[in-house]
Image (cartoon, helix red, strand yellow):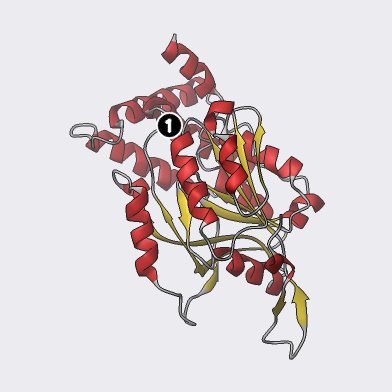
């Protein structure tokens, strides 16, 4: 059953006594092979004082999430099954839940602070020109060995409440670990996550952001707080991710959803990091696999066969 507060109104401080109806928020989590991690994240969402109107988990196999856990949640929730891949799984949510006003896509290891959902309601109500939004990441384990669930909760507990100086600023792209989309924009325009970016779908957040930027503002709201644990289990092998680090930016440049200069800089930085750190790789990163993937992609570029979905063939060859 829906919480009563989802039908509340939000007062516009610039409009006298005028109130506007509150938007509905669906949280969507695409997850594969990380059932325990996803379960703990869902458990955290259930503790929030201002929960979403609905939760949807998009999985590629029934083992990806224990559906029986949904019975205890204080809001409607469901599991949907479809083809594997971040873009594919997120698109299944868009197909089935376009009736929500806002869809908040979270990684299965992203913990939102209390107030995040209500902050989204306020943002998308008061700023009708905003089509996508992302929050402030207090800590990001993706840049290190990853954070435990307990460490993430500790960061949230110590963050406090954002003050009035917290900014709302226009940005080039959302960060895919916490990315909210106005459903009406997607209903009016045929934009979806690009399923030609398979599996981990490296840079699919930037790709969709740049396409939706034609219809409104992309913003970062510093009042929306969260922690990205950056859990390393269940992610793409180094070879496949290394290939995507080259193939996906080149693909985006060719189709016009990415500016060449920043994407080429990103590619060069990844190649350099993988080359240098492959000599003494971090225990949590397959640097040599990533470097091999980078070099394979560069060779494919020279041979005229570079494409994001080549990683599916590489995966097949890798697994025999």
Task: Out of 296 and 208, give the one closest to the viewer.
Answer: 208
Q: Is residue 58 left or right of residue 265?
A: right
Percent of width and height locating residue 26: 66, 53
Point 39% across, 45% down: residue: 230
Residue 234, horizontal then vertical, whole percent: 43, 31
Q: Quadrant of residue 11?
A: bottom right
Q: Quadrant of the C terminus?
A: top left
Residue in the image at 47% along x and 32% along y: 244
Residue 87 seen anywhere in this rendered image of the structure: no
Residue 276 at x, y = what percent? 23, 37
Quickly name the residue at label 1. 234
Say which of 117 and 40 sits in front: 40
Which residue is most to the bottom? 16
Q: Does residue 83 sit above or below 284 in this rendering?
A: above
Q: Residue furthest right?
A: 188
Q: Is residue 147 above or below residue 302?
A: below
Task: Please say whether residue 57 is visible from this viewpoint.
Answer: yes
Q: Secondary structure at mark 1?
A: loop
């Amino acid at each position: 059953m829906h919480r009563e507060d989802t039908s509340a109104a939000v007062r516009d401080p610039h409009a006298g006594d005028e109130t506007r109806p509150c938007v509905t928020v669906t949280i969507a989590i695409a997850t594969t092979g990380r059932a325990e991690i996803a379960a703990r994240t869902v458990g955290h969402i259930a503790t929030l004082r201002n929960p979403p109107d609905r939760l949807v988990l998009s999985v590629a196999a029934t083992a990806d999430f224990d559906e029986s856990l949904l019975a205890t949640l204080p809001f409607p929730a469901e599991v949907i099954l479809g083809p594997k891949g971040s873009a594919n799984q997120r698109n299944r949510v868009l197909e089935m839940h376009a009736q929500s006003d806002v869809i908040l896509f979270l990684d299965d290891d992203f913990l939102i602070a209390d107030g995040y959902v209500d902050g989204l309601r306020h943002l998308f109500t008061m700023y009708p020109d905003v089509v996508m939004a992302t929050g402030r990441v207090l800590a990001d384990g993706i840049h290190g060995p990853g954070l435990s669930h307990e460490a993430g909760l500790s960061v949230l507990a110590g963050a406090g409440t954002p003050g009035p100086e917290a900014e709302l600023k226009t940005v080039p792209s959302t960060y895919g670990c916490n990315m909210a989309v106005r459903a009406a924009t997607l209903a009016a325009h045929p934009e979806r996550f690009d399923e030609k970016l398979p599996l981990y779908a490296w840079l699919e957040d930037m790709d969709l952001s740049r396409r939706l930027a034609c219809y409104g503002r992309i913003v970062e709201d510093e009042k929306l707080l969260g922690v990205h644990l950056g859990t390393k289990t269940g992610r793409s092998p180094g070879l496949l991710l290394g290939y995507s680090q080259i193939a996906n930016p080149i693909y985006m440049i060719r189709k016009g959803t990415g500016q060449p200069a920043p994407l080429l800089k990103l590619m060069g930085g990844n190649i350099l990091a993988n080359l240098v750190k492959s000599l003494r790789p971090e225990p949590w990163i397959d640097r040599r696999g990533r470097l091999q993937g980078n070099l394979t992609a560069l060779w494919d570029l020279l041979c005229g066969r570079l494409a994001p979905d080549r990683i599916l063939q590489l995966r097949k060859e890798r697994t025999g």
